[in-house]
Structures are given as structure tokens and as C-alpha cells.
Amino acid sequence: MTWKLFKGHGSDDSTAGQDLEGREGDRSGGKGRPTPKRRQAEQRNLRPLVPKDRKASRKAAKARLRAKENEQYEAMRTGDISHMPKAERLPWRIYIRDYVDARFGIAEFTMPMILIFFVVTMFGMTLSPRIYTIAMIAMYAYIVAVIIDLAFMWFKLKKRLVAKFGERAVAKGSRSGSYAWMRAWQYRRWRMPKPRYPKRGHWPE
């Protein structure tokens, strides 16, 4: 009886030892491999903050930036809104472009008109003072007409923007007013981004 108790007790110790070894084996990797230390894992995942070849890294960054700028320029030239710069994809800016492109304004002819006035005044100074005076008066009258036209355009456009998009579309930081004025000043065929419609009259809703 005593011998059996001894034998049973020894058997339990052996089983417990085997279980302990099994658990240790599981913790060590389960396949005969030791578990990697935490420091070794961190070193394996560590990436250098500064690349070894800084010149090559700067060159690659410039190439990526240039490729992105070229893509955005091509999108603006072709009218592809989805690839334009983020500022040009704002809904109120799209609305401003469509509104300005739909109307006929005298502001877009400012540059050629100034060139014509300059040539006329140059010849007027040598040919006749009267021609010079008339040309100067006509030039100033045209400039005043352009300012009135742009002010009237912005007055109507601003009301539409507020009604459709709220005050954020005409807030000071949005620069919507200057954006509309500059686009109206450009000749329609040369505007960037490209007008969505080839002809005037397509008013935004």
C-alpha cells in the first residue's frame, strides 16, 4: 500500500514535469525555436529616420512633386476636376467658374484693349494731340466700365453663392471675390482651369 502511494506520487510528479516542459515549449515557439526578445523585434521593425543617401532621396521627392504638378496642370488644362488641386475642387469655386464662363463680360478684353489704346496714343502724340486726348478719354472710360461690370457681376454672384453654399463660400479666407474677378479678367479661351462648356450661356443651377 505504501509502495503504491509512493508510485502514484512519483507518477504525478513526472506528469506535471512533462506538462510544464510542454507549456515551456509552447511559450518558446512551439516548433523548437526560441521566442525572439522584445528588443530584437523592435530593432527589426526600426526604420532609419534619415535616409542614407540624402541626395537621392531629395531627387526622388522632387521627381514625385514634379509629376504631381504636371498631373494637376494637365487636369486644369483639360478640365478634369477629379485630378485638379484641392482648392479648385471646392464646390463654390466650380460654381464661380461656371458662372463667370457663362456670362459675357467686357473685362476679358482688357489686355487687348489696353494694347490698342497704347498704340493709338503713341501715334496720336506724333500725329495729332486731339487723337491722343480722345484715346486717353476712351481708355479711362473703358477701365471704369470694366470696374462697374465686375462689381455688378460679383454682386449677383455673391447672392447666389450664399443662397447655395452659405456664408463660408464668401468668407474672407475663401477669396471667392478675387477668384471671380481674376477669372473674369482673363480671356475665356485662355482661362485655367479650362471652362467646362465650349460656349457661353450654361448657367450653374
Image (cartoon, rainbow, N blue to C red):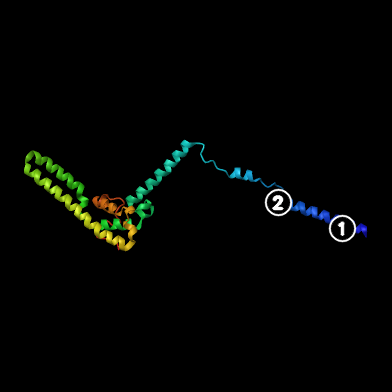
Looking at the image, how many numbered discs can be counted on the residues? 2
Q: Position of residue 141 (x, y in %)?
A: 14, 50
- Residue at 31%, 61% (x, y): give it: 162
Horizontally, residue 9 falls left or right of residue 197, namely: right
The N terminus, quarter of image: bottom right
How many residues crowd mark 1 within 10 Å: few (<14), some (14–19), many (20+)? few
**Disc on res. 8:** 1
How many residues crowd mark 2 within 10 Å: few (<14), some (14–19), many (20+)? few
130 to 157, vertically: above or below? above
Horizontally, residue 87 falls left or right of residue 102, namely: right
Q: Nearer the viewer, residue 59 or 20?
A: 20
* Secondary structure found at label 2: helix
- Residue at 35%, 48% (x, y): give it: 73
Q: How far apart are marks 2 and 1 (CA)?
A: 29 Å
Of the image marks 2 and 1, the number of the one nearer the N terminus: 1
Q: Which amino acid does label 1 sit on?
A: Gly
Q: Residue 58, can we see it? A: yes
Q: Which amino acid does label 2 sit on?
A: Arg
**Disc on res. 44:** none
Q: Where is residue 74 in the image (x, y as percent from the top left)?
A: 35, 49
Q: Nearer the viewer, residue 3 or 196?
A: 3
Q: Which of 189 and 134 is in front in this view?
A: 134
* Secondary structure found at label 1: helix
- Residue at 83%, 53% (x, y): give it: 14
Q: Position of residue 129 (x, y in %)?
A: 7, 42
- Residue at 33%, 50% (x, y): give it: 76
Q: Where is residue 169 in the image (x, y as percent from the top left)?
A: 33, 57
Horizontally, residue 69 falls left or right of residue 18, namely: left
Residue bearing mark 2: 27
- Mark 2 and mark 1 in contact? Answer it, CB < 8 Å: no
